[in-house]
Amino acid sequence: MGLTNILILTAMVALALFTVMTRSLLRAAIGLALTSAVLTVMMFRLGAPLAGVFELSVCAGLIPVIFITVISMTKPMKKEEAKEFAIERWSRFWILPIIVVIAAILLFTAHIKFDAKLPPVHAESDVRDMMWGARQLDMLGQVMVLMAGAYGILVLFKEMKKRW
Amino acid sequence: MGSLFILIPLFVFMLINLPPRMVMRKLAFWAVLALMLLQVGFVLFPSLSSFAAASGLFRMDLAIDKLAQMCLLSIAAVTLAALLTGRALITDENQSCNFMNLLLLVFIGMNGITLVKDIFSMYVFLEVTAVSSFILIAFSKDKDGLEGAFKYIIFSSIATVMILSAIALLLLVAGDTSFAALRAAIKLHQNSHVIMFAISVFLSGLFIKSGLMPFHGWLPDAYSSAPGAASVHLAGIVTKIVGVYPLIRIVHSVFSANVSTNNVLMITGAFSIVVAAFAAINQSDFRRMLAYSSISQVGYIILSLGCGSALGLAAAIFHFFNHSIFKSLLFVNAATVEAKSQTRDINEMGGLAQRMPVTGITSALACLSVSGIPPLSGFWSKLLIIVALWQANQYAYAIIAVMASLVTLSYMLTLQRKVFFGSVSNSMKGVSEADWKLLMPSIILVVIMLVVSLLFPLFLNTFLVPIGGI
Amino acid sequence: MVAIELLLPFSFFIALIFIIGLYCVVATFDLIRLIIGLELLIKAVTLLIIVVGYLSKHPSLAQSMVITLIVIEVVVMSIAAGVVLNIYLYNKSLDARNIRNLKG
């Protein structure tokens, strides 16, 4: 568990925290994009290059674009309202970090054993062979999800121009 | 043969969406109708599909056993009812075509969930079904529908995240995601903390998806605010296939007496039965009351599943089938009443049986079946559940089941009395009987229910006893 | 046998991101922030799957799972965005407390 891994993971957690805590929605969307970018770096380090490329192009590109589109089309809350909501939220949920710390201490001292043996490893095929070979059903499922998404966009977005 | 259940509907779907739109729109309804009947035919007479031995086109690892057959039958029946209801209720041709296509997508997704032997593929088809259901709930784009759809999206996605993390942890231990590999791995390491954590997270995710208490936050809103035809489909079969069927399948095939999840299942089931039954008493919205009743009946299924014996499993599956039939019937009637009287508040309704005789009779039969009155089908399945519990020495749970059945009877009779019997209230003066297009789904469902009720001994021998020894 | 103990430090970070995402979903009034929190949860699960793939020496199975997951996530997000936009058209605001139309 190298030092670089720990650094990258800490950066990811910090960016996630920034995404949640920031008051401006636009910054939250950008924070999400940056979190995905750091996740991509982690993926490359852990030996998953193809998934990393997907993650970078989609989750750090397409999804923040969707978010920014939605944010720009809807009027966000005003600054003062956002501030008082943030204060109110903090006062309701101040107990949360304390619970997390206590839970962590409890788990640490409970000696959770990760004691399952890993199965023996045999030689593995490449990602592309696996996706199109062994997991064809998933590919079919993806095609169907995309068709469902197309219908969703058709149903949800079609008449919006009239009511805008 | 199993891949036909996915490939043929997919082919029809693509066919319906081909360029000559005018022609295809008119064709769509009949094509989907033919598909449903084809599915029922294939399940009941497997030899019809033996011509498709050349379906090695796709390499799919699918299996059909008795449990899958029951589920496929109920999927076809409820989708047929939803299709007919949608045809009658949705008048705009564009929207009607969209509705049928979405219904077909949910249908393919549910078939996929029922047939796969691999837990990640089950997740993929779960998402296909869920995504199409999101769109169906938000279909009419009114305020309530959108809110219900959004709540469903949030809860369903949280449940999906939990299921996925459990799959990832199980992948670590098992090396592969198919049911056989998982079963071998769980048998090998029974007391490992990683596996217990993964299983508990997985069960929580599935409880959220099936709407058991205390994870039922999305269910009453989604059921009551969806448009009429979509609610028939959602309440009748989608929630069950998406949440309850994976529970049955995983507990039966993957855990198979190596993991003691029985207590958790029974406690959650009993809790759902009792709390939902009491919550249903005070509702004034027709569909909300039916939604709480659904939660209660799903609790019965889970209670019977957790009892652990073969009879319990068979009773759970039988109640699954029965519930899909009579709950869809109730929702079809609710949609009919709402379409004719423009309201869902049962306090405003009254005496509709005089104006809508067919709807009144079918609704009365369905209410009696839910409450478990002999000789209707609900009575048989509840009897089997109680017998299974008694035989497994779970006397406390059996008594709870019987008591809750009385509460169910009381609120169902209240519903029936307030809506249909009594004198015609003032606001209901202008209501007339629904036209034949809207009556057809309720009549079909009632016929199925009566056939199952009266031919119960036949049903028992051909379908249920083999299920017990799957 | 040793590799599975490597899960522990990774799972610490994954659990942190999970808790942050869950906090975002639970503690916000704004619908768009809800969806962002959901995205963070999915990121945590993606990281978990990749770590599992790395530790069990099955990187290609994990990668195909992640690619499928990303495709599905995009579709779910776009539909959620569509629903949110339509809610905005009705209520002219995205404050979750204002849309508590249905009881409970």
Image: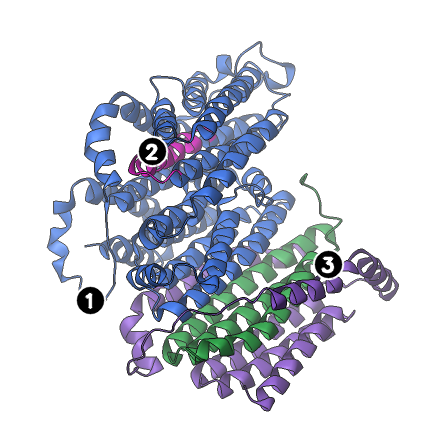
Chain colours: A purple, B blue, C green
Of B444 and B50, nearer the camera is B50
Which residue lies at the image location 47% right of the left edge and 20% below the top edge? Answer: B433
Q: Percent from the top left, x then y, of residue B148?
A: 60, 46
The residue that label 1 is drawn on is: B57
Left or right relative to B422: residue A144: left
Amino acid type of the residue that numbered disc 1 sits on in the rendered structure: Leu
Residue C1 in which image quadrant: bottom left
Quarter placement of the N terminus of chain A = bottom right
Return the mark for residue C28: 3
Circles 2 and 3 on the same subunit: no
Which residue lies at the image location 34% right of the left edge and 73% below the top edge? Answer: A119
Where does the magenta region start and end? B307-330
Left or right relative to B469: residue C60: right
Secondary structure under tag 3 reads: loop
Amino acid type of the residue that numbered disc 2 sits on in the rendered structure: Ala
Question: What is the distance, in whole Å, between disc 2 and disc 3 at their CAs?
Answer: 43 Å
Question: What is the distance, in whole Å, between disc 1 and disc 3 at their CAs?
Answer: 49 Å
Q: Report if the CB atoms under discs 2 and 1 are less than 8 Å apart.
A: no
Of B116 and B341, nearer the camera is B116
The residue that label 2 is drawn on is: B315
Up/down of B139 relative to B57, above or below: above
Of B380 and C84, nearer the camera is B380
Which residue lies at the image location 31% right of the left edge and 77% below the top edge? Answer: A120
Q: Earlier in the sequence, mark 2 or mark 1?
A: 1
Residue lying at the far top in this picture: please name it: B423
